[in-house]
Image: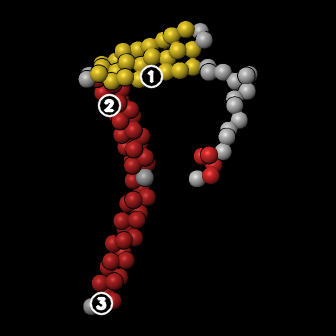
């Protein structure tokens, strides 16, 4: 709490703002504006374009997960066999 009341050092004169930006969302449109020393740039994207980009990222994630799942198939089969043997052994002991 004491830190809030302590005065802070003013920024050095060599420090300056390099870029500033804003992102606004109006219904189905997203407007992004960025201002730098070189100028101002911006984009207007519709919700459909954002959804397509998100769908592409999800599809890539699914492809990666599918490849990992397929690569681990031999190990899963080996574990399943071991689990079956453990279950059979446990059943034989309880009988």
What's the CA distance linking mark 2 and mark 1?
Answer: 24 Å
Above or below, comparing residue 41 to residue 60 in the picture? above
Labels 2 and 1: the sequence-earlier one? 1
Left/right of residue 2 with respect to residue 48 in the rendered view = right
Rendered residue at 31%/86% (across/down): 92
Q: Nearer the viewer, mark 3 or mark 2?
A: 2
Q: Secondary structure at mark 2?
A: helix
Above or below, comparing residue 43 to residue 12 in the picture? above
What's the CA distance linking mark 1 and mark 3?
Answer: 68 Å
For the residues bearing labels 3 and 2, Cβ distance under 8 angstroms: no
* Residue 61 % position (x, y): 39, 38
* Residue 74 % position (x, y): 42, 55
Label 1 sits on residue? 22
Label 3 sits on residue? 94
Q: Quadrant of residue 32?
A: top left
What's the CA distance linking mark 3 and mark 2?
Answer: 52 Å
């Amino acid at each position: 709490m004491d830190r809030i009341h302590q005065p802070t050092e003013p920024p050095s004169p060599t420090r300056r703002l390099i870029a500033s930006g804003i992102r606004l969302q109006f219904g189905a449109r997203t407007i992004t504006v960025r201002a730098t020393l070189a100028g101002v740039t911006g984009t207007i994207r519709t919700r459909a374009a954002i959804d397509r980009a998100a769908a592409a990222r999800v599809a890539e994630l699914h492809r990666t997960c599918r490849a990992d799942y397929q690569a681990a198939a031999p190990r899963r089969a080996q574990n399943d066999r071991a689990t079956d043997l453990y279950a059979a052994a446990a059943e034989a002991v309880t009988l």
